[in-house]
């Protein structure tokens, strides 16, 4: 279901962006009216994000292409607005309607796992799977169920909801931008800056420092809301600087005339080695932050590096 939602979200985002590009802000009124429709049906709480993210991302994406902005503007604004809207929606539902969609989702997931466990046991018996392999697989399901039922991890999921929404939005808007730039809105996006020119606003560094500073220095037991908020902000800002560093790597790959496909292949390869992946991402975050002063691509000077000057 998650993959289906993601694909549907990308399709809706691209469609809304194209409509906004052609018809402007008048189309946004129609999108807002459509987004209100789910509120009249029971169970809208579980599909709120499905409607809201494409609306936000599509509108911002259409504006981005219309004004010739870039990926940095697109994913930063879209992800920030989505994270705020999802967090606000969660707390309104929890405190006004007494409905916690995270608890509800966990209960449904646990129930689904238990049902699948029974089906898998029957399948293993049907195909005469060895007892050792059978027990190992079923134990892994039990471990996952125990984790979901652990209130500590449930609370962690609730605390990290803003960052989770921010990160998910980055994935969806980033993939949508790639398809829009390369295929569906190619002729409209010639002046739109892609990943290789991604640059975080210089004021974000103060947000990053404040976020990590508050999280580290303030007692999280005495001031849980403040520290959790600071952690979400700090992680979100760190991700933006990581993306900036990846953009720098892509810039120099293109400058050297190497195939850009090297970059995604390298990232995918690192995913199979979690420890190395975490180390590389931390290092990239540092590179992204240093670019604020180093300006490695010379984007703020009159001597801007030319990607087409390969090998120089």
Image: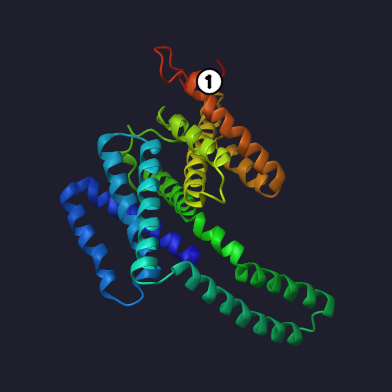
Looking at the rendered structure, the number of numbered marks drawn on it comes to: 1
Q: Mark 1 highlights which residue? A: 310
**Is the residue marked by circle 1 packed among few (<14), some (14-19), or many (20+) residues within 10 Å?**
few
Residue drawn at the location 24% of the way across and 52% of the way down: 19
Q: Does residue 305 lie above or below 127 as drawn?
A: above
Q: Residue furthest top?
A: 302
Name the outermost residue toward the front.
Answer: 222
Q: Position of residue 1 (x, y in %)?
A: 49, 69
Near-viewer residue (205 or 241): 205
- Pick the front one: 144 or 257: 144
Display coloring: rainbow
Residue at x-position 52% and y-position 20%: 296
Looking at the image, residue 285 sits to the left or right of residue 67; the answer is right
Percent x, y of residue 118: 66, 84
Evaluate whether residue 150 shows in this view.
Answer: yes
Query: Quarter holding the C terminus?
Result: top right
Picture coordinates of residue 158, whole percent (x, y): 50, 60
Residue 72 point in image, percent of width and height: 40, 36
Q: Is residue 258 visible?
A: no
Seen at 63% across and 33% down, the residue is 283
Query: Can you tell which quarter of the image residue 137 is in?
Result: bottom right
Element assignment for label 1: loop
């Amino acid at each position: 279901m998650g993959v289906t939602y993601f694909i549907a979200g990308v399709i809706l985002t691209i469609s809304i962006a194209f409509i906004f590009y052609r018809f402007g802000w008048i189309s946004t009124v129609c999108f807002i009216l459509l987004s209100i429709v789910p509120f009249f049906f029971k169970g809208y709480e579980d599909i709120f994000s499905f409607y809201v993210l494409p609306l936000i991302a599509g509108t911002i994406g259409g504006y981005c292409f219309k004004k010739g902005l870039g990926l940095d503007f697109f994913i930063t604004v879209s992800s920030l607005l989505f994270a705020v809207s999802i967090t606000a929606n969660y707390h309104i539902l929890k405190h006004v309607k007494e409905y916690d969609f995270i608890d509800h989702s966990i209960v449904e997931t646990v129930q689904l796992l238990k049902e699948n466990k029974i089906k898998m046991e029957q399948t293993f018996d049907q195909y005469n799977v060895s007892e050792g392999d059978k027990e190992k697989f079923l134990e892994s399901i039990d471990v996952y169920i125990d984790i979901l039922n652990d209130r500590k991890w449930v609370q962690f999921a609730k605390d990290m909801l803003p960052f989770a929404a921010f990160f998910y939005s980055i994935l969806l808007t980033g993939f949508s931008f790639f398809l829009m730039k390369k295929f569906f809105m190619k002729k409209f996006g010639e002046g739109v800056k892609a990943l290789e020119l991604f640059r975080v606003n210089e004021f974000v560094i103060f947000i990053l420092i404040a976020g990590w500073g508050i999280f580290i220095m303030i007692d999280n037991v005495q001031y849980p809301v403040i520290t959790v908020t600071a952690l979400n902000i700090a992680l979100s800002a760190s991700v933006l600087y990581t993306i900036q560093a990846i953009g720098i790597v892509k810039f120099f790959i293109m400058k050297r005339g190497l195939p850009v496909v090297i970059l995604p292949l390298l990232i995918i390869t690192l995913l199979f080695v979690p420890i190395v992946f975490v180390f590389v991402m931390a290092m990239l975050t540092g590179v992204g932050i240093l670019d604020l002063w180093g300006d490695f691509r010379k984007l703020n000077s009159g001597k801007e590096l030319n990607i087409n000057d390969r090998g120089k």
